[in-house]
């Protein structure tokens, strides 16, 4: 993996880890699926190498053949992803074309704080995302939630949660799923028995998840962000 610093027009600069699949340089005309990964609250700071300790970036160290472009930005200390939604969308605006990403195959995932961030980012611009995969996510502590989950009605969601999670009760993903489904969304929730908060250790190693992600495309965009 390589790293870069993304500087948005407005907002803080973010260090970003970038994974490119094997063959990316050899196929200059191919457009690649892209995964935006949002880490949890424990990794916030300035050293992007802390992201390699667990979660999806750790999996990528073991699986360099992972067939998606992956962006893993680092959230500054003292803030959350909810305060950086515009920065993250600007990051995708700039970096997806730069790596020859397919704009209809952009996916967002994250764990814990990043799982809530995945819900919020997809709700901010649902036409952009082919899927959202929130792990051990709480209902975002932001105005309009959980009702804003209805904005993702066009975005397929596969959420994961540990049945024994001592940090975020299972009622949180169930409530988000209920709102999403009530709006017509295609929503899956996998409750993992015997698993606590570290649900990413199981979910990101499940090949069925990545097969499901790879098969999905966002509708062709007829608009963008709404109020």
Image (cartoon, rainbow, N blue to C red):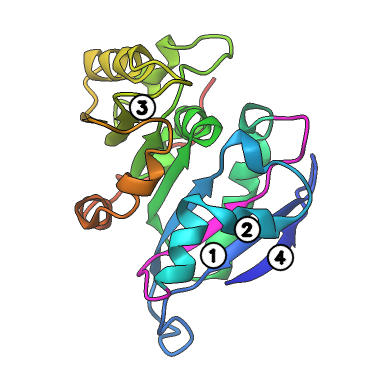
- Quarter of the rendering occupied by the N terminus: bottom right
Reading the image, the residue beneath label 4 is: 4
Q: Earlier in the sequence, mark 4 or mark 2?
A: 4
**Residue 69 lies within the magenta run:** yes
Reading the image, the residue beneath label 1 is: 97
At numbered mark 1, what does the secondary structure look like: helix, strand or loop? helix
Tell me how far mark 3 sits from mark 1, CA to CA: 24 Å
Of badges 4 and 2, the one in the foreground is 4
At numbered mark 3, what does the secondary structure look like: helix, strand or loop? helix
Query: Quarter of the image holding residue 171?
Result: top left
Tell me how far mark 4 sits from mark 1, CA to CA: 15 Å
Reading the image, the residue beneath label 3 is: 152
| Discs 1, 2 touching: Cβ within 8 Å | yes
| Badge 2 density bin: few <14, some 14–19, many ≥20, Cα 10 Å | few
At numbered mark 2, what does the secondary structure look like: helix, strand or loop? helix
Residue 211 appears at what percent x and percent y? 21, 57
Tell me how far mark 4 sits from mark 2, CA to CA: 13 Å
Of badges 3 and 1, the one in the foreground is 3
Tell me how far mark 2 sits from mark 3, CA to CA: 23 Å
Reading the image, the residue beneath label 2 is: 94
| Badge 3 density bin: few <14, some 14–19, many ≥20, Cα 10 Å | many
Q: Earlier in the sequence, mark 4 or mark 1?
A: 4
């Amino acid at each position: 993996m390589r790293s870069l610093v993304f500087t948005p027009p407005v907002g803080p600069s973010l260090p970003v880890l970038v994974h490119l699949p094997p063959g990316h340089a050899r196929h200059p005309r191919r457009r690649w699926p892209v995964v935006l990964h949002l880490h949890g609250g424990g990794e916030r700071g300035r050293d992007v190498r802390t992201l390699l300790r667990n979660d999806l970036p750790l999996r990528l160290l073991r699986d360099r053949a992972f067939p998606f472009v992956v962006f893993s930005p680092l959230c500054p200390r003292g803030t959350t992803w909810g305060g950086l939604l515009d920065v993250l969308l600007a990051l995708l605006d700039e970096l997806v074309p730069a790596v020859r990403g397919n704009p209809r195959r952009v996916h967002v995932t994250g764990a814990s704080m990043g799982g809530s961030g995945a819900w919020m980012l997809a709700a901010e611009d649902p036409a952009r995302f082919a899927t959202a995969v929130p792990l051990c996510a709480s209902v975002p502590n932001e105005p309009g939630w959980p009702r804003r989950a209805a904005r993702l009605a066009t975005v397929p969601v596969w959420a994961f949660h540990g049945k024994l999670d001592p940090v975020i009760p299972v009622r949180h993903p169930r409530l988000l799923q209920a709102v999403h489904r009530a709006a017509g969304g295609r929503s899956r929730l996998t409750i993992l028995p015997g698993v606590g908060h570290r649900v990413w250790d199981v979910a990101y190693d499940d090949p069925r998840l990545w097969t499901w992600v790879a098969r999905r495309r966002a509708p062709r965009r007829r608009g963008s962000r709404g109020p």
